[in-house]
Image (cartoon, rainbow, N blue to C red):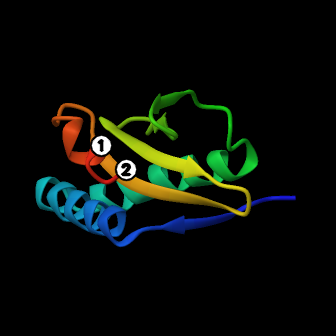
Amino acid sequence: MSLKLIVNPDAEADLAEAKQWYDQRRAGLGDRFLLSVEAVFERICRHPELHAIVFRDLRMALVRRFPYAVIYRVDDDQITVIAVYHTRRDQRGWQLRA
């Protein structure tokens, strides 16, 4: 049984901001970023407990080819994405969302 994946509004805003930034650098790069994040979402859905707990009950999965991490929580009935965060930014930003 696979769990439902929910992306919270803050994480949606993270995605939109990052996509816009990459699109401003090079046409189509934002779409490649989103595809890489989607691959992480699929991996999380297949193996929700694959990644280690990094803060309280939150887990972190790295995005391939981009310096981003997907921060998420596994509950009994769903997976909630808390943040899609640049790995060089201060971690307290996503930790405050916990």
Q: Is residue 7 left or right of residue 66?
A: right
Identify the residue under disc 2.
98
In this view of the protein, which residue sits in the foreground, 67 or 57?
A: 57
Check whether the beta carbons of the residues at disc 2 and disc 1 lie within 8 A of each other. yes
Q: Is residue 62 above or below residue 22?
A: above
Q: Tell me the quarter of the picture where residue 22 sits.
A: bottom left
Q: Where is residue 67 in the image (x, y as percent from the top left)?
A: 30, 35
The amino acid sitting under disc 2 is Ala
Mark 2 Cα shell of 10 Å, populated few (<14), some (14-19), many (≥20): some
Task: Label 2, secondary structure: give it.
Answer: loop
In this view of the protein, which residue sits in the foreground, 5 or 15?
A: 5
Mark 1 Cα shell of 10 Å, populated few (<14), some (14-19), many (≥20): some
Q: Which residue reaches farthest bottom?
A: 9
Q: Which residue is drawn at 27% across and 60% down?
A: 14
Q: Tell me the quarter of the picture where residue 18 sits.
A: bottom left
Instruction: Check the picture and name the quadrant holding the N terminus.
Output: bottom right
Q: Which residue reaches farthest right?
A: 1
Identify the residue under disc 1.
95
Q: Is residue 44 left or right of residue 34?
A: right
Q: Position of residue 97 (x, y in %)?
A: 31, 54
The amino acid sitting under disc 1 is Gln
> Which mark, by number, is residue 53?
none
